[in-house]
Image (spheres, rainbow, N blue to C red):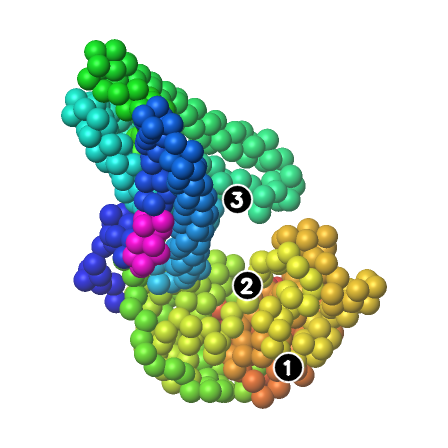
Amino acid sequence: MATDTQRPRPGAAILRTALRRNIGAMIAGTVLMGLYQAAETAFPIALGLIVEHTMQDRSLGSLGVSIGSLAVIITTVSLSWRFGMRVLQKANTTEAHRWRVQVAACGLQPVARDVDGLKSGEILTIATEDADQTADIIEVVPLLVSSLVAVVVAAVALSLADIRLGLLVIVGTVGILSILAVMSQRIGSSTQEQQAKVARAGAKVADLIIGLRPLHGFGGNHAAFGSYRRVSTDAKRQAITVAKVNGAYAGTALALNAVLAAAVSLTAGWLAFGGQISIGELVMAVGLAQFIMEPLKMFSEMPKYVMIARASAERMALVLSAPPVTVPGPERPAPGGDLEVDGVRHGTLRGLKFTVAAGEFVAIAPYQPRAAADLVAVLAVNAAPPAYEGVVRLGGQELADLSVEAVREHMLVNPYDAEIFGGTLRTNIDPSGSSRTLPEAVEASMLTDVVALHRDGLDYAVRDRGANLSGGQRQRLSLARALAADTDVLVLYNPTTAVDAVTEQLIARNIAKLRRGRTTLVITSSPALLDAADRVLVLDEGVITAEDTHRNLLAGDEEYCLAVAR
């Protein structure tokens, strides 16, 4: 049953989880990047000291020590940056992978999740772009801390020369961040809206590609393209808005940083002119004013990236925090068991009741296509037990007491429009590479002619969605995959609608032979498959109205004869 006890997982909680899981890498990255920024800041300080000592004692020894110190600083800068970024980017990539897998798992389990308003294309965008941008928080925090280290080191060094220079850096940095923090709020809201519109455009184009052939068939492709153009245009406009906001933010940050650097340089020059700081300290101050531009730029950009990461995390929360439609049970069905549908009311089904005994081959002849689709949705657990009345039992266990994984391991429901994936014939039939009945499945589905047609045989390359196969070849490939799975219970829905009558007759006989002793249910109006079944159930107006062999029904039921005879 549905539950309200699941704790919500907002974007902030997702970010906290990402930070907590990578605390070790972040500490190491922070130390190394802090060392890098400190060494970078130490460079102009060392230059100032070199000038100071060279002018005072003009000693070659002092000059050698100074040059050696510069070499150490440069080496520290190089190594700390290299290893610091390596640690952080590895953690970032790993964390993004974790979130991608988690979001994809939710998207692939529509039974256990109810994500209102999100299509598969949008979930794909969340699992890729939003997962990557959320994981960026792992780099943002160490870079923020390391930039702060650089600013603090610069402020302390300048304060040792003159307290007014140090205060100028501190006050200027606080002012810059205050201004940019306000601007980053606009970036966060604009980015979240852009991500939503881009995801909708992605979902629209995915739907368009899937339905391209039928759209061409009835001339609806122009209207569909127009619909996609409108969605894409909205996404483009929002992207332009975000670019403008980001441009304003970057320009403001650069201008403010330049003003602060100029203020530090001019103040140092004025102090040196008045004799309040030495020439060496002036060189150090001017050098720091230039070097501090980088950490200030990085420091000022961090609020923007934090807001982007939070916006992406909020979108991931739409999927990850979706309440479960049903709580999977812990039980597993008995192997080789029967299939029982008891009083199911769902859609057009009106108290549907029937049983398929273990090892039996049963066919259902639906008079209304919608009723067949509703039955398939229930058996495939695309409609969870709380979504319908009645009970479905598999191997003596109610579906409500079984996990989705246990149901699908025990019973395979193969839809008439099953997806074909890019790869080869072999990987489409046996994705896991573990089937022991692959040759038999190929032969039973009459896919042998497709295999023999190509030099590569089962290793023949299949394009995405089977674009280089005919409709009949795609359907037989899907059937071969279902048969190769060799599950205890197999449900086939219109498996031969795209093949010719002779091939259909052969496939019907082959299925009956290959599945002998295994529980098989075929939902079809094909005379060949109905004739191959042990018995036929007539599904009319949501209930079973007749039951007999195909030939007996043909001889004694005129309505059945009109419905299935070809």
Q: Which mark is residue 415?
A: 2
* Residue situated in front as seen by the camera: 516 or 450: 450
Circle nearer the N terminus (1, 2): 2
Kindly report the distance in space between the C-alpha atoms of the residues bearing marks 1 and 2.
22 Å
Task: Name the residue at 38% across, 35% down.
Answer: 62
Contact? badges 1 and 3 (CB < 8 Å): no
Residue 207: % across, % down: 52, 44
Judging from the image, what secondary structure is the residue with disc 3 in? helix
Q: Residue at x 27, y 47 (%)?
A: 11
Can residue 555 be seen from the camera position used here?
no
Residue 57 in sight in this render: yes
549 lies left or right of 130:
right
| Residue 553 in the image, given as x and y percentages of width and height | 59, 76
The reply to whether the magenta stretch includes residue 517 is: no
Q: Does residue 255 appear left or right of residue 431 in this picture?
A: left
In the rendered image, the vertical position of residue 91 relative to residue 458, given as above or below: above
Point out the frontmost of discs 2 and 3: 3
The three-letter code of the residue at mark 3 reads: Asp
Which is nearer the eye, 423 or 440?
Answer: 423
Q: Residue at x 17, y 22 (%)?
A: 164
Residue 207: mark in rendering: 3
Q: Earlier in the sequence, mark 2 or mark 3?
A: 3
- Region of the chain picked out in magenta, as a range: 21-32
**Cα distance between the residues tagged 2 and 3:** 18 Å
Task: Give the residue drawn at x 34%, y 45%.
Answer: 35
Q: Please name the predominant secondary structure of the magenta segment in the image.
A: helix
Picture disc at residue 436: 1
Residue 270 drawn at (x, y percent): 24, 12
**Tag 2: amino acid:** Pro
Compared with 126, 381 (above or below) is below
